[in-house]
Image (cartoon, grey):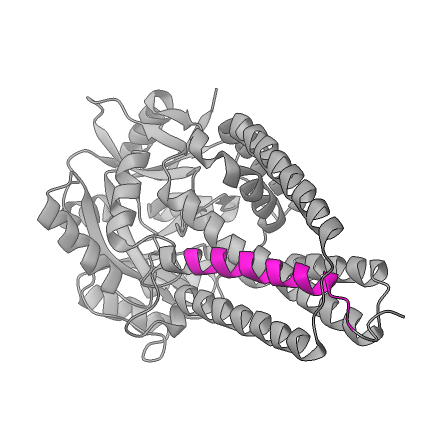
Amino acid sequence: MDLLAWFATTPEGEQLGKLAAQTVKVEWIPVPIWLAPFEPFRWLITMVSTGYPGAMWLVIPYSSIALLIGLTILQRLRTAWWHRASVTAIAALNTLLTVAGGFIAVNWVNAVVPFGTRWVVPENAPFVLANFHTHTTQSSGFLTPEQAVQWHLRRGYKVVAVTDSNTVKGGKIAQRFVEQTKLPATVLVGEEFRGKTHLILLNIHNDISPKDFDVPAAIEEAKRQGGVVIAAHPWTSKHSLEELVDWGVDGFEIVNGSALGDEKLQNLCKERKLAALGNLDLRSDSVPETATVLPKWANTPQKVAQALKEGKCAVIYLRNRISTGEFNLLKSWSSELRDLWRIGGAANFVGIAFWAIVGRLVLLRNRKKLSNQSTFHSPKKFILTCLVILTLFALSASFSVWAMAWNLKQNWFPPLPLVVVIWAVICFVNWLLWWRLTKCELHGCQN
């Protein structure tokens, strides 16, 4: 059974939080069996990529894996030094392409395929669940604004704020989508102001950029636009909690993703009767750990703002998945492994069996082919193949960076499904070409 904890700062919030923690259920949805061939790879990428404070940290494990693969191949080859160096370097680059592109592919699958968990709220409940921190493809998220709304509805949320980095564009797209489709969701237009301190600015209608505003001025401008200001993951703030309160924030994220604010933050919110929010900081997720509880009457952006300003809200979260303190890699791995097993154990075993059969068939076919013919490539063809591999690598890497880096997105950018398809095709082709290079029998290639 998944135990829920709650936190609130007012008597009204306490009632909402306690009731939600007692009545909301967590439903686990298994990975569909058709995804089984992809499931072992999803496990691998998830465990390699788990728990790091930011995407930049992934350079360390990814580069280490690429280096390990390269050194292993370098030791096993017995050809001329220039051949070994070329084949080893390409293997390392292909490994980097596989894991880095795989990170995008896995996160996209986690976002668009309905498996994992969802909140189950009683139909007659006097409350609804909300998430006020969402990134879409308009910044660094894996879902379009329209998909983000649908994702929240599938997961049990009724209120969602689309808060892309320094822009309200995604929120406006999502709000228009709900108006056109009449979906039962309340969408707030907002942004994550990414200055020295990150702020969630809700119910604003124009961008508020760090290029034009410092943190106090951004808070003032958001209020001028009639907005609500929430300090995002305040434990990373470059300003003190007291400064943020003095400048006029309406509340704080008590939970952001799987991180819980400390006692100092919780006590400050209670003393000042500030809004306490549990937000996902959503980019891609299959197991949402937290939600903000609002009264059921908060069904318009204006009423939501009123509830937050009056402290009529609460935070619920999965007790065994939320923690305070410094990052703990072993704990993060353990948590992810439990989730992977709970939603994808059977599919993973089917996937392993599938690839074992495929690998066996390919190996037998390759042995038969080698016994019947020899492979020969001229030095010119060897160099040309290397150049093709490097060109394809650069193409895939460029598309991936362009589609994911929020500060590079100006007008059009590649849709993520297209990026995933390009990565999958290029990854397969590059490894196939590399395999051919390792078998080439060049004049002078052997020692």
Residue located farthest toward the right when viewing the structure as drawn: 447
Q: Can you give x and y, in whole percent of width and height, for residue 244 in the image?
A: 39, 62
Q: Nearer the viewer, residue 341 or 332?
A: 341
Q: Nearer the viewer, residue 394 or 219?
A: 394
Q: Can you give x and y, in whole percent of width and height, for residue 268 in the image?
A: 43, 49
Residue 334 visible in the displayed image: no
User: Where is 233 relative to 285, above or below?
Assistant: below
Q: Nearer the viewer, residue 171 or 217?
A: 171
Horizontal side, residue 26 vs residue 446: left or right: left
Residue displayed at 42% across by 30% down: 32
Magenta span of residues: 421-442
Q: Can you give x and y, in whole percent of width and height, for residue 251 in the image?
A: 34, 52
For the C terminus, the quadrant is bottom right
Residue 262 visible in the displayed image: yes
User: Where is 440 relative to 122, above or below?
Assistant: below
Q: Main secondary structure of the magenta part?
A: helix
Q: Quadrant of residue 88?
A: bottom right
